[in-house]
Image: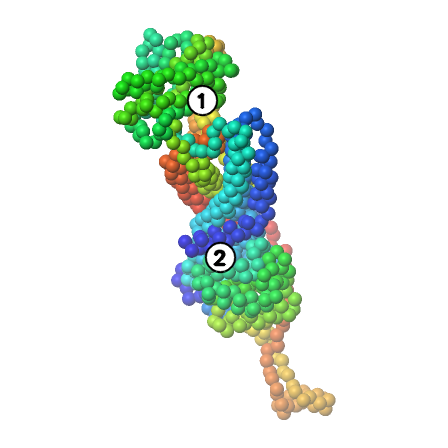
Amino acid sequence: MQTDFAVETKDLTKVYVDFWGRPKVRAIDRLNLSINRGEIFGLLGPNGSGKTTTIKLLLGLIFPTAGEAVVLGHPPGDVATNSRIGFLPEESYLYRFLNAEETLDFYGQIFHIPRRERKRRVADLIETVGLSFARKRPLKEYSKGMSRRIGLAQALINDPDLILLDEPTVGLDPIGSREIKDLILELKKQGKTILLSSHLLADVEDVCDRIAILDKGHLQVVGEVDDLLSLKDTLEIRVRRISPELRDKIEALLRENDAELVSTEHPSRTLEDLFLKTIEETKSEDRSSPG
Amino acid sequence: MKTVAALAKHTFKDSLRKKTPLVIFFLALVLLGCLQFLPAITPDDRLKLVQVVSSKAATFFAIVVAIFLAASSIPVDIEDKTIYSVLTKPVSRLAYILGKTVGLILVTGTILLLMSLISYGVVRLVALQAAPKGLAEPLMAKIPLYASSLIHQAEGEGAAQVPPGEMAGLSGSGKMEAQWQWEGIKISDFPAEEIALQGRFLVLGRVTGGTMKFVAINPTSGQKEEALAKLKPYENFTVSFPASILAPAGALKVVASAEEPEIYFGVTLRDLFLLKKPGSFTINFLKSVVLIFLQLLVIVPIAVVGSSFLSAPVSVTFSFFIYFCSNIVELMRALAHSLTEPGTGVFGASIIGHVHGPVEIPEQTLVVKIINTILKYFIYAISYILPDFSKFAPANFLADKIDIPLRAILLLLAYALLYAASLLTVSFFIFRRREVGK
């Protein structure tokens, strides 16, 4: 499959089977996605919708039942491609007995980063994710938020082109969450492609260029965040310096086109509305269709 | 290669920080410390006991650490999901398996080395304590020189060559003798004043043993020297002859015959050997550590194969089972053989049968025969697939103070490497398509 996209999937399907090989769960069903280079793409969905399964398929940790995926021009799990990928798992599953520096140093070694360069990069990353105060503490003593930060740091150790973040802000306080989002935007400025999955809608709305909503393994909606959230049949007019008199006359003035029009734009519904509506729709479809 | 090194280093570090190896290491230390207080009749027995127990204990604990760490390595990585952050980096699944294996071999090797250092100290200490009480043999490594042929002769039956590995009987009543022949002996290998022969024969008929007459013959000059030795079951004996018995051409014959009619001895080619000038105990001890290390070289990949498709507890059990079976392959083969040859028995029962007269053996039915035949070849197949760990056991060499031949170590090294390589290949093919996340 030739592609210019950073990530592309074609009818990607994953069916989990039980011990006897009988199908148990259809986690992903004929998923078609394309993620442009340099964009922040959000994968949304309730728990169990297939977000993490999709990411694991893209990383070659698990293998598709049908369909295919292309990541940076190669099949998932390709060793050479992996050197250009950064991955933050859903929870930061790292070696509990190592401290922050040792952890990053180990991952740096895997990328064959020379010792001096590695040392510099490890120090920079610990600084960037705000863990300088705990650089020598073993990870088993880390709080959830600290684990997220070290997880993010290890995902960035190789200065990757494509970054996959599974629930990047989960377990972080609002300030920590803001810092991570700023970091994500900063990474985009450096030209990196970012795929993030989340069920925290505000995160996605704040940083993503495009989103896809998954439910029960099906792709429900995909598109640009602004497009998806705008209500095109409604026009919102914002008026500045409006006095009571002016307000009385507003309809007349509007009709006469006399008032100073400060801005006109499509008002947005929140992503939350869209999300809930989409999930609601699938539910009613399920109820109406038998079986 | 760099990736494998990085993973190995990391596995090493991570394993040592877990508690398992430390706990086992301290258990081993306590045991080694207790060796000092082992009761024994003679100082020589005590030294022997300490050597055997410390060598077996070091092997056992190293194997236990190896199995626990290696059998759980991949399942724990998958369970903790730490594998996600490794396999999503430029690490092939082969490099992952190799890195784990090399790291684990290094960890267990280090633990083995530490335990060996301590047991070396204990052995030296015990030898030092025993020396004033009259130690017949100090710490050393005897270098045996085996005969090139063994000829068995019985009155009325003539002479017959005994093939290596086979046993010939010697009984005083039958006027039988066994003749060992050496060729190409270098006189400089032996002490100037006297040459010693050592051996251990199978002694049947009387628990206190019996007397054996040895006659050494110089084939060139015809010079003869005679010596008597008291042989006890399961014990080594030594006989000495003046060094002048050695022919300059390097040939020697030794004829053994039983002195008493009611005793029966079983002898093989390698049951009697000449002792060269002894080698260093320290070097022999080091060789014994190398042999134990070779066991780790095989057991770690076995456990890694298990861990590439089983859960941690199942894989630990599987590895222990394999290790247990690998220590008794000879017994398995004997058992398999006896299945279709009733009466041959295990543990040389046929010899006992011979001594006590024929035993009545009931005929097997057809069904039993078929089942036994299938079982026989099944056990045979397994016994040949399994590595033979008894070949890697150094304890008896140490106990008998016999030098471990370098050639044997090299052969076993090649064997272990080949075995490890095949196991890792199997492990890779299993793990290649394994899904590591749910």
Label 2 amino acid? Thr
Q: CA distance from mark 2 to mark 1?
A: 64 Å
Q: Residue at x 50, y 46 (%)?
A: B110
Would you call the spot at circle 2 few (<14 residues within 10 Å), some (14-19), or many (20 or more)? many
Is B365 located above or below residue A264 in the figure? above
Could you say which quadrant of the image residue A253 lies in?
bottom right
Q: Chain of mark 1?
A: B
Residue B417: where, in percent of width, then height?
40, 41
Per the image, the residue denoted by label 2 is B88
Residue B314, picture quadrant: top right
Residue B344, placed above or below residue B71: above
Amino acid type, mark 1: Phe
Q: Nearer the viewer, mark 2 or mark 1?
A: 1
Chain letter, disc 2 residue: B
Q: Is residue B369 visible?
A: no
Q: Position of residue A194 (x, y in %)?
A: 51, 66
Could you tell me residue B383's position as x and y percent? Answer: 44, 30
Task: Name the one closer to the observer, B18 or A239.
Answer: B18
State whether residue A228 is above or below residue A77: below
Q: Residue furthest right?
A: A244
The disc label shown at residue B237, or none = 1
Q: Which x, y percent locates residue A28?
A: 53, 55
Element assignment for label 1: strand
Residue B225 image label: none
Q: Do pointers 2 and 1 mark residues of a single chain? A: yes
Residue toward you, A145 or B285: B285
Residue at 59% x, 66% y is A131
